[in-house]
C-alpha cells in the first residue's frame, strides 16, 4: 500500500469545489465554501447559472491560489513524510482487518491537495481530496477514512459482484460504508490512535446519535464486526441496514 500527496493544480480545485455547488446553496456542503473564503460574494454566486459559477470561482480565487502555492508545496512534504512515518503499522492493520494482503495492493492511492474544504473521494482512481489548510495529522486522519472505503469496496465488490454505482451517495451501500469507518477504526488502536478525528467522531455526526431498535447503531455494528470475519460482517450489516433502512434514513435528516 502506498499513498502519495500531490498538488494537481488550480483547475482541479475549481472542478472539485463545483461538485458541491450544483444545487441548493443552503446545503451545508456548499455553505462550507463561503465560510472558508469570505472574499466570495455568496449572493452574487447564487444568482449565477451553474456554468458561470465556475468562472466566478476562477476569477476570485486565482490570486489566492498563487499566494498559497508555496504552502501547497510545504504540505506535500509534510503530508508525505507523516504518511511514511506511520505507513507500516497502517498497512498491517488493514491486512489484519480485511481478507487481502494490503502490503502489495493499493499502491497508487493519491491525496490531491485542494482549495476545496469538502473533500471527495473517488473509488475508481483510489484518490481523494484533502483541504490544504489541514495539518499533517489531519491529512493522515482523512487518509485513513478514505482508505477504509477503498479497501472495503474492493473486498465488497469481489464478494458480492454487484453494481459499483451503488457505492455512491445516496445508495444504502454508501451509507453503510460511511458507518463502518467507526467500528473498523475503533477496533484497532494502530488506526484510532494516529487519527486526530477519532475521539470527536471519525464518521458523520448523525451516526453517533442514531438509534435503531433503541440502541445506538454504531454499537450494533461494532458488536457485529467484532463477532465475525469481514465478509460475514458485510453480509450481516447490510441485511440489518436493509431491514431498518427507513429508520436509518430518518436519522440522517
Image (spheres, rainbow, N blue to C red):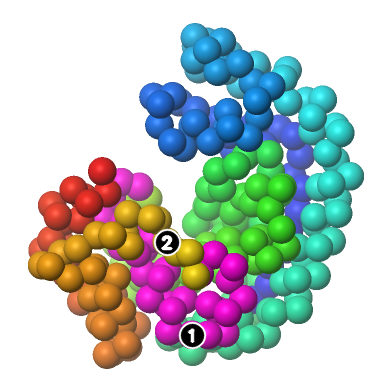
In the visual, does 251 lie left or right of 148?
left
**What is the x, y in percent for residue 125?**
57, 55
Q: Residue at x 72, y 71 (%)?
A: 83
Picture quadrant of residue 242: bottom left
Q: Residue at x 71, y 48 (%)?
A: 133
Let me know if residue 59 is in the magenta part.
no
Tell me residue 248's x, y (percent).
20, 56
Q: Does residue 106 lie above or below 113 as drawn?
A: below
For label 1, the crowd category at 10 Å Cα-Cα, with few meaning under 14, some 14 to 19 and many 20 or more, is: some
For residue 74, above or below residue 224? above
For the N terminus, the image quarter is: bottom right
The quarter of the image holding the C terminus is top left
Residue underneath mark 2: 203
- Quick check: can you spot residue 61? yes
Is residue 172 in the magenta section?
Answer: yes
- Is label 2 in contact with label 1 (beta carbons under 8 Å)? no
Residue 222 sits in which quadrant? bottom left
Q: Position of residue 212 (x, y in %)?
A: 15, 64
Q: Nearer the viewer, residue 117 or 18?
A: 117
How packed is label 2: few (under 14 Cα within 10 Å), some, or many (20 or more)? many
Q: Earlier in the sequence, mark 2 or mark 1?
A: 1
The majority secondary structure of the magenta stretch comes to: helix
Q: Is residue 42 left or right of residue 211?
A: right
- Horizontal and vertical percent position of residue 128: 59, 53
| Residue 231 visible here | no
What secondary structure is marked by label 1?
loop
Q: In percent of the image, x 68 and y 79: which residue is there?
A: 87
Q: Which residue is mark 1?
A: 188
Q: How many labels were placed on the picture?
A: 2
Point out the stretch of residues depicted in magenta: 169-198
Locate residue 201 relative to residue 131 in the image: left or right.
left
Per the image, label 2 sits on a secondary structure element best described as loop
Amino acid at each position: 500500500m502506498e499513498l502519495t500527496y500531490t498538488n494537481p493544480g488550480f483547475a482541479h480545485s475549481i472542478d472539485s469545489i463545483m461538485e458541491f455547488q450544483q444545487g441548493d446553496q443552503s446545503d451545508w456542503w456548499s455553505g462550507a465554501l463561503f465560510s472558508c473564503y469570505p472574499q466570495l460574494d455568496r449572493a452574487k454566486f447564487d444568482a449565477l447559472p451553474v456554468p458561470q459559477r465556475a468562472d466566478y470561482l476562477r476569477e476570485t480565487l486565482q490570486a489566492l491560489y498563487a499566494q498559497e502555492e508555496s504552502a501547497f508545496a510545504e504540505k506535500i512534504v509534510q503530508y508525505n513524510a507523516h504518511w511514511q512515518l506511520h505507513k507500516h503499522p497502517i498497512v498491517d492493520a488493514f491486512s489484519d482487518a480485511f481478507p487481502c494482503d494490503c502490503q502489495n495492493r493499493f499502491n497508487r492511492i493519491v491525496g490531491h491537495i485542494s482549495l476545496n474544504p469538502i473533500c471527495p473521494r473517488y473509488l475508481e482512481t483510489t484518490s481523494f481530496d484533502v483541504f490544504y489548510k489541514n495539518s499533517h495529522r489531519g491529512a493522515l486522519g482523512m487518509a485513513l477514512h478514505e482508505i477504509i472505503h477503498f479497501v472495503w469496496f474492493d473486498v465488497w465488490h469481489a464478494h458480492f459482484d454487484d453494481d459499483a454505482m451503488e457505492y455512491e451517495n445516496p445508495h444504502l451501500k454508501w451509507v453503510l460504508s460511511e458507518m463502518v469507518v467507526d467500528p473498523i477504526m475503533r477496533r484497532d488502536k494502530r488506526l484510532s490512535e494516529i487519527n486526530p478525528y477519532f475521539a470527536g467522531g471519525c464518521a458523520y455526526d448523525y451516526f453517533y446519535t442514531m438509534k435503531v431498535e433503541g440502541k445506538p447503531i454504531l454499537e450494533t455494528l461494532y458488536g457485529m464486526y467484532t463477532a465475525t470475519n469481514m465478509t460475514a460482517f458485510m453480509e450481516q450489516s447490510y441485511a440489518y441496514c436493509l431491514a431498518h433502512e427507513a429508520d436509518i434514513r430518518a436519522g440522517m435528516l
